[in-house]
Image (cartoon, helix red, strand yellow):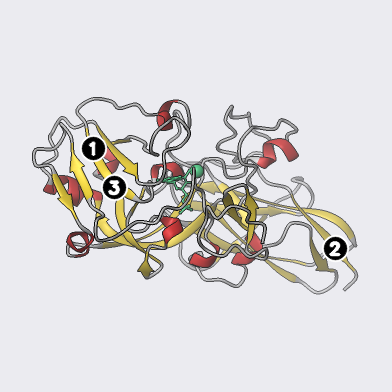
């Protein structure tokens, strides 16, 4: 294990994670043979500082600000007693795939050099944020909802907090207390976190302690200095294979992967074995949920040995697709080009 500082509580074994400073990326081969959801033991972790220890006896969630008529404070039991909803949704870091600006486009972007493993899909359960806001008497002219985390202050920027427009907050956002059927684990936001379907991961504030509702636009470092102007996540695809996987020649192989988009359902997945000259439709299997991902498979019988590249590209229902090269985002966010996944074909 490559963990010097214990900023993450759960075990980060080498076969499940690649560790980048205080952040843990899931290895995509760890999804091979798994079901629709990412098991909690391999779900990526992105912490600005460190996973905090929160005492349930004193923990409260405050809902307040000029955009609500009845400010309130809830304890854990209050939330558990409220109407609950279950939601299968992805959480993905805006910087997922950032290293490919460097390795594919030779134009590195600063920040955590994630491969494609800063995404996971879990079954979340909790209270719809709109229920909490309605119960607090959200005003007709409310503009932004500002969730704040209880983890340590990040550098001189204060606690992690990012305004969410009230329209999204009243739509499909969950105040989640369960992940994959159990209480949220410490690293993923215990006791409660937001789950903001389709949006950049930073919107899904962990260790939630405070929700402020405003009647004007709010600005924090998390929508000005970091993650300005990013909301929904673009289209991406990954193979459930290790990097530089060794595959045998001869018999047909079943290659599997998943594609996702924060902007709508995936409608088509194609795979190329010749660096993008020709493309074959992949078949899909399993669930097909708008806020999560689409699992797919394609059969391939490599006919000659040597290094090869696997490529997958998906298209979502808005028509957004993956290109071979994309313009660089200054912060290295939203790498949605087709990823060139290297493999080695050997005599079987
Ligand atoms: N309070 C708090 N919330 C946070 C963060 C954080 O550091 N502190 N990181 C954000 C970022 S950048 C991402 S990508 C997701 C990661 O969620 P996970 O660690 O459960 O995978 O949490 C978001 N919520
Ligand atoms: Mo993130």
Q: Is mark 3 within 8 Å of ligand 1?
A: no
Label 1, secondary structure: give it.
Answer: strand
CA separation, marks 2 and 3? 51 Å
Mark 3 or 1: the one toward you: 3
Residue at 18 percent across and 45 percent down: it is 133
Q: Earlier in the sequence, mark 2 or mark 3?
A: 3
Label drawn at residue 209: 3
Residue matched to label 2: 345
- Left-right relation of 121 to 209: right
| For residue 286, side relative to residue 175 (left or right) | right
Residue 128 is situated, as x and y percent measured from the top left of the image, at 24, 54
Name the secondary structure under disc 3.
Answer: strand
Which percent across, then down, holds residue 64?
Answer: 17, 39
Residue for point 42% across, 63% down: 185
Left or right side of 223 for 341: right
Residue 206 in the image: state x and y as whole percent: 38, 50
- Report the residue marked by disc 1: 212
């Amino acid at each position: 294990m490559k963990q010097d500082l214990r900023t993450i509580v759960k075990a980060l074994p080498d076969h499940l994670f690649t560790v980048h400073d205080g952040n843990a990326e899931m290895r995509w081969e760890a999804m091979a043979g798994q079901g629709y959801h990412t098991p909690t033991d391999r779900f990526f972790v992105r912490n600005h500082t460190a996973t905090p220890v929160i005492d349930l006896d004193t923990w409260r969630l405050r809902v307040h600000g000029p955009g609500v008529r009845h400010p309130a404070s809830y304890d854990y039991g209050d939330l558990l007693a409220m109407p609950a909803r279950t939601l299968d949704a992805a959480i993905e870091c805006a910087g997922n795939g950032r290293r490919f600006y460097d390795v594919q486009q030779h134009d590195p972007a600063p920040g955590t050099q994630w491969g494609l493993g800063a995404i996971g899909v879990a079954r979340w359960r909790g209270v719809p944020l709109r229920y909490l806001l309605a119960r607090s008497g959200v005003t007709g002219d409310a503009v932004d909802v500002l969730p704040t985390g209880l983890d340590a202050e990040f550098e001189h920027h204060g606690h992690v907090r990012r305004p969410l427009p009230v329209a999204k907050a009243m739509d499909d956002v969950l105040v989640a207390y369960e992940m994959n059927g159990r209480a949220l684990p410490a690293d993923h936001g215990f006791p409660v976190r937001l789950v903001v379907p389709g949006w950049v991961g930073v919107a899904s504030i962990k260790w939630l302690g405070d929700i402020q509702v405003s009647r004007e636009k709010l600005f924090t470092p998390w929508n000005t200095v970091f993650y300005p102007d990013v909301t929904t996540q673009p289209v991406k695809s990954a193979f459930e294979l290790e990097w530089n996987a060794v595959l045998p020649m001869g018999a047909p192989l079943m290659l599997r992967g998943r594609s996702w988009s924060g902007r709508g359902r995936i409608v088509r997945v194609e795979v190329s074995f010749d660096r993008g000259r020709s493309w074959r439709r992949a078949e899909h299997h399993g669930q097909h949920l708008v806020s999560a991902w689409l699992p797919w498979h394609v059969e391939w019988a490599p006919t000659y040995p040597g290094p090869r590249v696997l490529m997958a590209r998906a298209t979502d229902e808005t028509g957004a697709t993956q290109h071979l090269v994309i313009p660089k985002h200054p912060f290295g966010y939203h790498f949605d080009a087709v990823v060139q996944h290297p493999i080695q074909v050997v005599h079987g």
